[in-house]
Image (cartoon, helix red, strand yellow):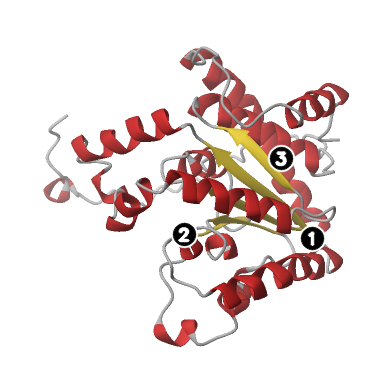
Amino acid sequence: MGKSSSRKESASKNANEPIASPGTEKLPRKEYERELERLQVELVQLQDWVRREKKKICIVFEGRDGAGKGGVIKAITERVSPRTFRVVALPAPTEREKSQMYVQRYLPHFPAASEIVIFDRSWYNRAGVERVMGFCTERELEVFFSGAPWVEKAMVDSGIIVLKYWLEVSPEEQTRRLESRITDGRKLWKLSEMDLKSYARWDEYSRARDDMFLKTDTSWAPWYVARSDDKKRARLNIITHMLGKIPYEKMPARKIELPKRRETNDYVAADYTSKLIPQLF
């Protein structure tokens, strides 16, 4: 099974600790890579179980800008099949989508049998950025809070395993990460005008987060909080917790042997040297 008593005890202990990040040292890269490789093997075993049992899993990642959602999702998905692990990161809604029932544009992306869908931000945009930045009315917010738990109840009742994670980053670490995007051409695309406006509203987002937890934390779809000041620790902790919450069973190891290649005597290799790209490295 994908659970252990030590993981359960650790998760229970962490749940009672405050959200603020503790003063732990950064995890060494070699230790991180060793543990990530081990967990990614388990993710492949989870994938096999989901395919075999035709399971449906939905994982939601929320958090402030710079909290590390993208890095966690990459760590989960980089060694598995995109046909099983599907990432959904929706753009801003179109005018047509704004006229729809709020949850409507998310419904087509919910998992079918043999799928794990990961939402990089989700319907909880309404409880966060839309609320703080004034993109929804108080009435729309009330409707969302009254309806979201029951949408998730319907998901669970249909056989979907729902996991919701909030990545909690400190204000100091968020500042450092956003400043690094300004000076790194590889990361500049991550820094939008909305990110800059949101950055100034730390307390408003904190109040919105607290209210979101209060109104949408249910027994069938609870929230889990991961400290993310140390990205490496956050990735390992989240993947470990996720695996512990899914009752998957390991598939027996397959014995695989490569077949012999068929060789023919009438094949003459074509000359593709004129099509080779320059070897600059």
SS at mark 3?
Answer: helix
Q: For the point 50% across and 34% down, which residue is it? A: 169
Look at mark 2 in the image and give the residue it sits on. Answer: 132
Residue type at mark 1?
A: Lys
Q: Label for residue 54?
A: 1
List x then y, in percent, for residue 68.
Answer: 47, 39
Give the left or right position of residue 84, taking residue 131 as reference: right
Q: Which tag is nearer the camera, tag 3 or tag 2?
A: 2
Q: Quadrant of the N terminus?
A: top right
Q: Label for residue 81?
A: none
* Residue 256 showing in the rendered view: no
Look at mark 3 in the image and give the residue it sits on. Answer: 242
* Residue 180 showing in the rendered view: yes
The relative height of residue 134 versus residue 41 in the rendered view (above or below) is below
Give the left or right position of residue 111, taking residue 281 as reference: right
Q: For the point 63% across and 74% down, which residue is it? A: 107
- Binning the other alpha carbons within 10 Å of mark 2 as few (below 14), some (14 to 19) or many (20 upward) gives many
The mark nearer the N terminus, 3 or 2, is 2
User: Residue 252 appears in which quarter of the rendering?
Assistant: top right
The relative height of residue 33 versus residue 99 in the rendered view (above or below) is above
Residue type at mark 2?
A: Val
User: Residue 226 appears in which quarter of the rendering?
Assistant: top right
User: Residue 241 appears in which quarter of the rendering?
Assistant: top right
Q: Quadrant of the C terminus?
A: top left
List x then y, in percent, for residue 12.
Answer: 81, 29
SS at mark 2?
Answer: helix
Give the left or right position of residue 245, taking residue 230 as reference: right
